[in-house]
Amino acid sequence: MLSHDFGAGFADPVRDAQAVFRAILDAFANPGTPQNLPAIDTEMGRLGSITLTLTDHDTAIWLSPAHDTDAVRGFVGFHTGASIVADPAKATFAFVARGDALPDLARCNLGTQEYPDRSTTIVAEMSALSGGSLLVLRGPGIRDTQEISPMGLPGDFVAQWRENRELFPRGIDLLLVADGKVIGLPRSTRIVEA
């Protein structure tokens, strides 16, 4: 008999989705401050819990190569009904597996002046949220400065982010996921190398 194992969803859908949503809200409200992120037991792990929380049949998502598998496509289709697109410029969310390259921010959907909220949010699984190049964050939600050092960002990330921020209110938002935690980088955040 053919198996169609799409992986488990949330054990307690309402409570689990609320916990993930709260972690994401807190991550964006406090840029650079790691928030605990519940996981589900799937190939996508914590990215899967974000997928279940933020996507539905009206959502277009882009998957990086390591997640663009039959198992993940089946999981997304079965649990959320979200459409999977080949171009990050057409995606509401872009999910990037650890080790895969982030799409260039300028290649994603940047939103419009009228609808800046229709831009892409990138959800990227990092090798770790510390141990990489030191970055200093400033802006809304940060008292003075906040330092982060995620491992796995592209070498030109700070330059890409500066261009992204200049588009405000348009632009990309970013969630960095590793070690059971999530860090939010809203487009309003200024980032410089230390």
Image (cartoon, rainbow, N blue to C red):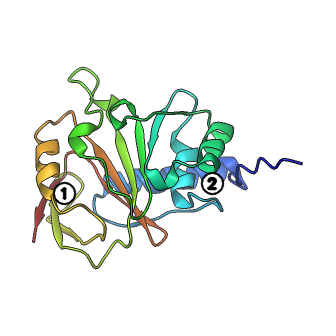
Residue type pointed to by label 1 = Phe
Dot 2: few (<14), some (14–19), or many (≥20) neighbours within 10 Å? Answer: some
Q: Position of residue 136 (x, y in %)?
A: 15, 66
Q: Which circle marks residue 135 in the picture?
A: none
Q: Position of residue 63 (x, y in %)?
A: 46, 45
Q: Nearer the viewer, mark 2 or mark 1?
A: 1
Q: Farthest residue toward the bottom? A: 131
What residue did someone put label 2 on? Answer: 16
Q: Position of residue 117 (x, y in %)?
A: 32, 31
User: Which residue: 40% across, 34% down?
Assistant: 91
Q: Is residue 177 left or right of residue 155?
A: right
Q: Which sits in the foreground, 86 or 188?
A: 86
Work out whether 124 lies above or below 75.
Answer: below
Per the image, label 2 sits on a secondary structure element best described as helix
User: Which residue: 25% across, 33% down?
Assistant: 110
Q: Position of residue 115 (x, y in %)?
A: 29, 23
User: Which residue: 24% across, 46% down?
Assistant: 104
Quarter of the image where the C terminus is located: bottom left
Dot 1: few (<14), some (14–19), or many (≥20) neighbours within 10 Å? Answer: some
Q: Which circle marks residue 157 in the picture?
A: 1
Q: Which sits in the foreground, 155 or 140?
A: 155
User: Which residue: 38% across, 65% down?
Assistant: 126
Q: Is residue 14 left or right of residue 36?
A: right
Per the image, label 1 sits on a secondary structure element best described as helix
Q: Farthest residue toward the right? A: 1
Residue type pointed to by label 2 = Asp
